[in-house]
């Protein structure tokens, strides 16, 4: 009688089974996120007036068309998206995951953070929850959902590549605390959610580096939560405004030592707006700004970070170098919509 020989799995097959289990768990996590968050993702089609082009026979300028993504973050129809998707929009149409097509109103947008809020009115809306972007870590699995090139509710997955990046907004200011990910993004993904495997939105997808592989960026959810609240309340973000144009310049070492300056670079003032706070304070073209309210300022980006809404209407001190003399000017910032390369 032949004996029955049972083969026990070897180490190789055990590893393969473990890998298969991990891949299955990964697939289930991504699938769960897609099923949970997709109902909140909307496709935005935007019409923007062409301001500098006349239509046939002298008709008013026509309209250009664009598209992007967004997602519901409240049950009463508020949608987060990118400012560059809806800025100056004459008409916005939102297509929901269930096929409903609705007109959307622009609540407000903030080019400095590339965030905007629009609103639709409809029953039975499913929002996506905003999570805590400070709780994520590099290497964490994330899922991006959007409408690249009009392909609605496209799902891609990757990891958080890095935290705390800075990204230049179209307005010229730096957006801080940006999330870098390798989850694939394409034109049309802008404004869509970046989501953890627990289903929490931790970023608003905003940009890719064209020509690079896997260099994609999202505005952190904590930034989006703050900006969205202000946009819903006021329609724009309040920021302190000084009213000058400038450029970053290096300082001469002999001047740094002579004046005991805390910075090696400053902001050369190249223009002043008539009636602006800094013109009234006595700032002149050719002055170099090196500090603000006791804080060193080595460039325009550093000054922008200090010009918060709490300083609107509050007398502050502008530290400058004029020729070979250090001076302090008293200035009262006003509230204004941000300018590109100016304070």
Image (spheres, grey):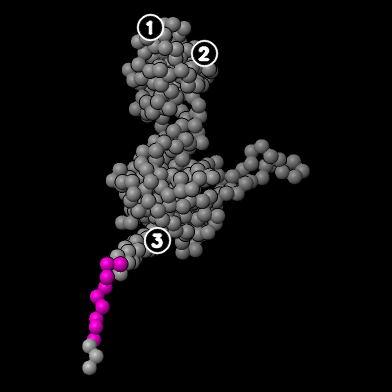
Find residue 266 and report its horizontal and vertical position in percent: 43, 18
Q: Is residue 174 left or right of residue 262?
A: right
- Region rendered in magenta: 4-12
Left or right: 299, with 90 as reference point: left
**Which residue has dot 1 on it?**
258
Q: Badge 3: few (under 14), some or many (20 or more) residues near its Cα, within 10 Å?
A: many
Percent position of residue 272, x then y: 52, 17
- Tell which tag, 1 or 2, sits nearer the viewer: 1
Residue at image coords 30%, 69%:
13
Q: Secondary structure at mark 3?
A: helix
What's the CA distance linking mark 3 and mark 2? Answer: 55 Å
- Could you say whether the residue bearing mark 2 is in a helix, strand or loop? loop
Look at mark 3 in the image and give the residue it sits on: 34
Residue 15 or 225: which is nearer the viewer?
15
Q: Which residue is mark 2?
A: 285
Say which mark, if any, is on residue 181. Answer: none
Element type where label 1 sits in the image: helix
In the image: residue 44, left or right of residue 225:
right
Position of residue 26 relative to residue 297, above or below, is below
Q: Earlier in the sequence, mark 3 or mark 1?
A: 3
Asked whether residue 19 appears in the rendered view, the answer is yes
Residue 96, compared with residue 315, is above or below; it is below
Name the residue located 55 percent from the left edge and 41 percent from the top edge: 88
């Amino acid at each position: 009688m032949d004996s029955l020989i049972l083969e026990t799995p070897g180490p190789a097959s055990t590893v393969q089974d473990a890998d298969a289990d991990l891949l299955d768990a990964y697939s289930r996590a991504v699938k769960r996120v897609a099923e949970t968050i997709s109902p909140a993702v909307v496709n935005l089609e935007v019409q923007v007036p062409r301001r500098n082009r006349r239509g046939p026979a002298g008709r008013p300028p026509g309209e250009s068309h664009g598209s992007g993504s967004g997602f519901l973050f409240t049950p009463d129809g508020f949608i987060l998206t990118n400012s560059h998707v809806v800025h100056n929009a004459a008409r916005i149409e939102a297509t929901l995951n269930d096929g409903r097509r609705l007109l959307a109103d622009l609540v407000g947008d903030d080019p400095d953070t590339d965030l905007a809020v629009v609103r639709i009115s409809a029953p039975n809306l499913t929002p996506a929850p905003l999570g805590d972007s400070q709780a994520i870590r590099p290497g964490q699995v994330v899922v991006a959902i959007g409408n690249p090139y009009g392909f609605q509710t496209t799902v891609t997955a990757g990891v958080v590549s890095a935290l705390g990046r800075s990204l230049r907004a179209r307005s010229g200011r730096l957006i801080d605390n940006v999330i870098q990910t390798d989850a694939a993004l394409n034109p049309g993904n802008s404004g869509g959610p970046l989501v953890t495997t627990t289903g929490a939105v931790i970023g608003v997808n905003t940009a890719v580096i064209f020509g690079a592989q896997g260099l994609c960026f999202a505005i952190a959810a904590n930034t989006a939560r703050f900006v969205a609240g202000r946009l819903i309340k006021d329609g724009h973000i309040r920021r302190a405004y000084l009213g000058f144009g400038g450029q970053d310049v290096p300082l001469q070492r002999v001047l740094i030592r002579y004046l005991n300056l805390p910075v090696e670079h400053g902001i050369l003032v190249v223009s002043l707006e008539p009636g602006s706070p800094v013109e009234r304070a006595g700032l002149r073209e050719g002055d170099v700004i090196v500090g603000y309210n006791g804080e060193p300022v080595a460039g325009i980006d550093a000054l922008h970070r200090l010009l918060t809404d709490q300083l609107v209407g509050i007398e502050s001190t502008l530290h400058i170098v004029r020729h070979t003399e250090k001076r302090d000017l008293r200035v009262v910032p006003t509230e204004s919509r941000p300018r590109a390369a100016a304070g």
